[in-house]
Image (spheres, helix red, strand yellow):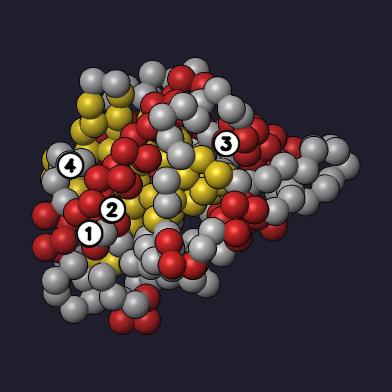
Amino acid sequence: MELARSAHAFPPVRQHWFVDRHVLLAEVAPLSAGHVLVIPDLHILAAALLPPAERVRFEKVCREVGLRLAEHFGRDSYLTFEHGTGRAGALLPRRVKCAPTEHAHVHVLPNCVGPGVLDLLDQYTKADGYAGSPLNPADWSTRRTALEEPGSSYHSFSVGTREGERGMFFRPPDGALPSQYFRRFVAHFSQGSAEAFSVRSDWRDEVVFADAAVLHDITATALFLEADEWREGLSVRGSRDIARQDETDRTSTLAPTHRHE
């Protein structure tokens, strides 16, 4: 995959890598440089539905990527968030999906909000009438339980450092938070003005009206994924290796294209 060429002449770079049975994708509508999607190759709708062994691998990849993103982009921590569903999007009262393909994915990016991000999120969601609760990011049973009712979903948000992770959990009574809710939160508090930087909160606008800053962040993220020095300890292969991998060694095939809610 190559970045669209523009008058700014950003070099074409690969935007996705296959890491220990996960696709790492440089977000096409980044909230900041270092915005990555971690996508398991097993076709599920929410990370909480991963089998135990796959979930351990998924947690390891997300955490390792988060820590290295934070270090590389000069932050003291990283953020992750997911909107997970146990049902097809058509059965949800609001869309909670990775359109046009419904598939589990988690956003991982350097913490561009600051050390008080969870307190800010608590205030932000309560002002909108959405009460969250503290979440141990290692607690997957709470998230699985949230998927048991028809048309159900969960939303999780966490911050991580080398000392560990802390998070918040949301299970709205009507099925889902508004579309792009966590994106709007991060865009608002990382920039100080949602209106002045609204292009970062709506992925549709950011893709359509991509400017030099957006292309810079995509390129910076892709070059990070491409670098050799961060990959020690993880099995990393490029897209050509994905294509060559024997089908019997893969649970499913995931095309490295993406759009989301």
The disc, 4 or 1, on the residue closer to the chain's N-terminal end is 1
The disc, 2 or 3, on the residue closer to the chain's N-terminal end is 2
The disc, 4 or 2, on the residue closer to the chain's N-terminal end is 2
Residues at badges 1 and 3 in contact (C-beta under 8 Å)? no
Q: Which residue is mark 2?
A: 54
Q: Amino acid at mark 2?
A: Glu
Q: CA distance from mark 2 to mark 1?
A: 5 Å
Disc 4 crowd rating (10 Å Cα; few below 14, some 14-19, many 20+) is few
Q: Amino acid at mark 3?
A: Leu
Disc 2 crowd rating (10 Å Cα; few below 14, some 14-19, many 20+) is some
Residue drawn at x 56%, y 64% as measured from the top left: 255
Mark 4 or 2, which is nearer the eye? 2
**Residue 138's disc number:** 4
Q: Position of residue 145 (x, y in %)?
A: 11, 63
Q: Secondary structure at mark 1?
A: loop
Q: Position of residue 73 (x, y in %)?
A: 52, 23
Q: Position of residue 191 (x, y in %)?
A: 51, 32
Q: Which residue is mark 1?
A: 51
**Residue 225's disc number:** 3
Q: Secondary structure at mark 3?
A: helix
Residue 16 appears left or right of 51:
right
